[in-house]
Image: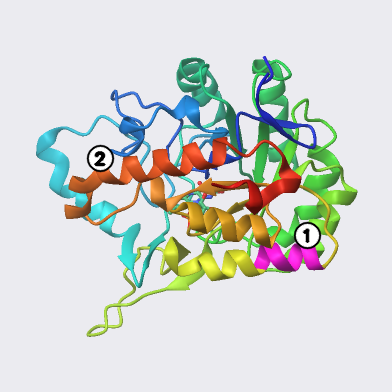
């Protein structure tokens, strides 16, 4: 079930060069009839994207710092919103979040969500705290998903808000889990660690592509009390604020001679943002915060935001050849 008219990034087949970043559109479909909680996603058909990357899935379900429930009654809404404000805030031209990998677990995803996303191209994001967990995740996906039915699996070893030092397990994860995967493996890089070294290790281990970047480790406090805004104290910064950092990382990867395909994510919202990332050396671009996050009043503008997303899709869909990057962008 590969893609006939799509684009290839090494052995990864995408429908086009615009994908969506892990988590922002949940699992691609939601039990409640909504796509995650993104009003924008309801106005843009997800099958149009090069691929939709799922929320990071772990071996067992995880509450993280939020919740896995999606059956909140209207009377519970105030409590839910209060909880929400402790894991996600709009700050300084971006967003800071610490959901802590709340997810239903890989088996529930494959049973309850994945079958309803067959019209989409999917990248399944996987996260764990040991090589064994990554091996279990890869084996579980291998068993449930035939070759070519998804674009890739993405290893998330770059998240700050689960408070874990992934450098301890990276080599073992690459050595044990990458060769077992029937699907191409993407490694997601953090801008806060030695991403050049990690990219080289990934290439040596047979990883097919890199996603750059995950959120930037960040802190915001209430200026009067010094109390951190987020329950986890530290969170990950996303959105416009990190675009220059994402561009730096992609350019530095290319300057260092890293040849793997790069899916760029970090503050992308417009066609010009995509142009910049293609110039920096990206092979595909990914919409994260732009597909979902806004201030509450901002959600009223979801139809306009959706039009913007459609415009970016149309422009990026027209790029046939990776070597003609920005020149080909209308
Ligand atoms: C609310 C939120 C949740 C996220 N959850 C995940 C996640 O579960 N796994 C992951 O690899 N990245 C996660 N990310 C990071 C995004 O996939 C993306 O790499 C990052 O936000 C940068 O892109 P952006 O600036 O366009 O949002 C999350 C980002 C946000 C804002």
Which range is magenta? 249-255
Q: Can the viewer see residue 138?
A: yes
Tell me the residue that label 2 is attached to.
303
Residue 53 figure quarter = top right
Residue 310, image x, y percentages: 40, 38
Residue at 36%, 35% (x, y): give it: 41
Is 56 or 137 nearer to us in this picture? 56
Is 285 or 21 nearer to us in this picture? 285
Q: Residue furthest right?
A: 204
Colour convention of the picture: rainbow
Tell me the residue that label 1 is attached to.
198
Residue at 71%, 42% (x, y): give it: 186
| Residue neighbourhood size for the residue with mark 2, other residues' Cα within 10 Å, grouped as few (<14), some (14–19), many (≥20) | some
**Above/below status of 296 relative to 243:** above
The secondary element bearing badge 2 is classed as helix
Residue at 34%, 23% (x, y): give it: 31
Q: Is residue 136 magenta?
A: no
Give the numbered dot on residue 280.
none
Q: CA distance from mark 2 to mark 1?
A: 39 Å
**Does the residue at mark 2 contact the one at mark 1 (Cβ under 8 Å)?**
no
Q: Can the viewer see residue 56?
A: no
Q: Is residue 252 magenta?
A: yes
Q: Is mark 2 within 8 Å of ligand 1?
A: no
Is 85 or 310 nearer to us in this picture? 310
Looking at the rendered image, the disc whose residue lies closer to the viewer, 2 or 1, is 2
Residue at 49%, 35% (x, y): give it: 61
Question: Which is nearer the N-term, disc 2 or disc 1?
Answer: 1
The secondary element bearing badge 1 is classed as helix
């Amino acid at each position: 079930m590969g893609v006939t008219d799509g684009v290839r990034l090494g052995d990864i087949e995408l429908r086009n060069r615009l994908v969506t970043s892990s988590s922002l559109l949940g699992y691609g479909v939601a039990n409640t009839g909504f796509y995650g909680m993104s009003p924008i996603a309801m106005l843009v058909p997800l099958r149009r994207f090069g691929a939709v990357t799922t929320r990071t899935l772990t071996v067992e379900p995880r509450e993280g710092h939020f919740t896995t429930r999606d059956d909140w009654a209207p009377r519970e809404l105030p409590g839910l919103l209060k909880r929400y404000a402790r894991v996600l805030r709009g700050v300084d031209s971006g967003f800071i979040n610490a959901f802590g990998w709340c997810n239903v677990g890989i088996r529930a995803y494959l049973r309850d969500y994945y079958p309803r996303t067959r019209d989409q191209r999917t990248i399944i994001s996987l996260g764990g705290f040991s090589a064994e967990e990554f091996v279990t995740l890869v084996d579980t996906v291998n068993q449930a998903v035939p070759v070519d039915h998804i674009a890739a699996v993405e290893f998330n070893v770059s998240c700050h808000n689960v408070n874990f030092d992934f450098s301890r397990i990276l080599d073992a994860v690459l050595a044990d889990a990458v060769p077992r995967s029937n699907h191409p493996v993407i490694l997601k890089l953090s801008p806060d660690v030695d991403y050049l070294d990690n990219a080289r290790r990934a290439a040596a281990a047979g990883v097919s592509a890199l996603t750059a970047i995950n959120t930037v480790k960040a802190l915001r406090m209430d200026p009067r009390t010094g109390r951190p805004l987020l329950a986890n104290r530290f969170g990950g910064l996303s959105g416009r604020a990190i675009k220059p950092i994402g561009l730096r990382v992609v350019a530095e990867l290319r300057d260092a001679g890293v040849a793997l395909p790069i899916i760029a994510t970090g503050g992308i919202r417009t066609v010009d943002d995509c142009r910049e990332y293609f110039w920096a050396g990206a092979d595909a671009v990914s919409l994260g915060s732009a597909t979902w996050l806004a201030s509450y009043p901002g959600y009223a503008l979801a139809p306009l935001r959706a039009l913007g997303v459609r415009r970016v899709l149309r422009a990026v869909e027209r790029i046939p050849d990776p070597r003609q990057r920005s020149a080909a962008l209308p």
